[in-house]
Amino acid sequence: QVQLVESGGGLVQAGGSLRLSCAASGRVFQIWSMEWYRQAPGQERDFVARITRDDTTTLADSVKGRFTISRDSTENTVTVYLQMNNLKPEDTADYYCKVVQYGATSYWGKGTLVTVLS
């Protein structure tokens, strides 16, 4: 089992920045990748960013050049960060953290709301 705690969402003006965090605890040694998705009202949940255990990163085209993903590990926890710069109103969504373990078992966080005002 892996437990996830997300934080960092909020209200920001267009052009502003936010940093989301997702702290994973539990069987973190089995984590292969940590990912961010987002879901706008009435829309499907879309991939935003991924960082793997070997620090390979992948970003959706819509956020390249504005968002970065990084992670920090201790013996018992792994925290993934999503630094979001130059935010746009279309970035408004609930942002979800997802952890994928070796063997493809995955866990989702409860989400954190990001609202970007025009």
Image (tube, rainbow, N blue to C red):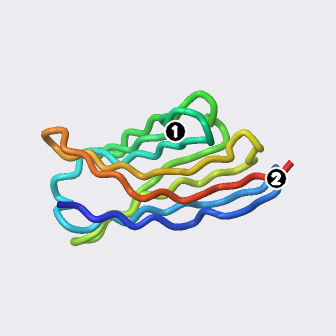
Single out the mark in the foreground, 1 or 2: 2
Q: Residue at x 71, y 57 (%)?
A: 17
Sequence-earlier tag: 1 or 2: 1
Give coordinates of residue 113: x percent, y percent.
60, 57
The residue beneath circle 1 is 48
Q: Quadrant of the N terminus?
A: bottom left
Q: Quadrant of residue 64?
A: top right
Residue 68 placement (x, y as % from top left): 56, 47
Please identify the quarter of the rendering in which residue 102 is found: top left
As drawn, the label of residue 96 is none
Q: Residues within 10 Å of mark 2 (few under 14, many from 20)?
A: some
Q: Which residue is mark 2?
A: 117
Residue drawn at (32%, 43%), measured in percent from left and top? 52
Closer-to-camera residue (63/45):
45
Q: Secondary structure at mark 2?
A: strand
Classify 75 as above or below 71.
below
Instruction: Count residues near mark 1 (Cα–Cα under 10 Å), then give few for <14, some for 14-19, many for 20+.
Output: many
Instruction: State how far apart marks 1 and 2 are (Cα).
Output: 20 Å
Image quadrant of residue 100? top left
As shown in the figure, which amino acid type bears the numbered disc 1? Val
Residue 56, image x, y percentages: 37, 39
Q: Is residue 87 left or right of residue 39?
A: right
Disc 2 residue type (three-letter): Leu
User: Is 21 left, or right, of 24 in this rendering?
Assistant: right
The residue located at (62%, 36%) in the rendering is 63
* Residue 23 spot, x, y in % from top left: 38, 66
* Local secondary structure at mark 1: strand
Between residues 32 and 96, which one lies in front from this camera angle?
96
Residue at point 35%, 52% (across, down): 108
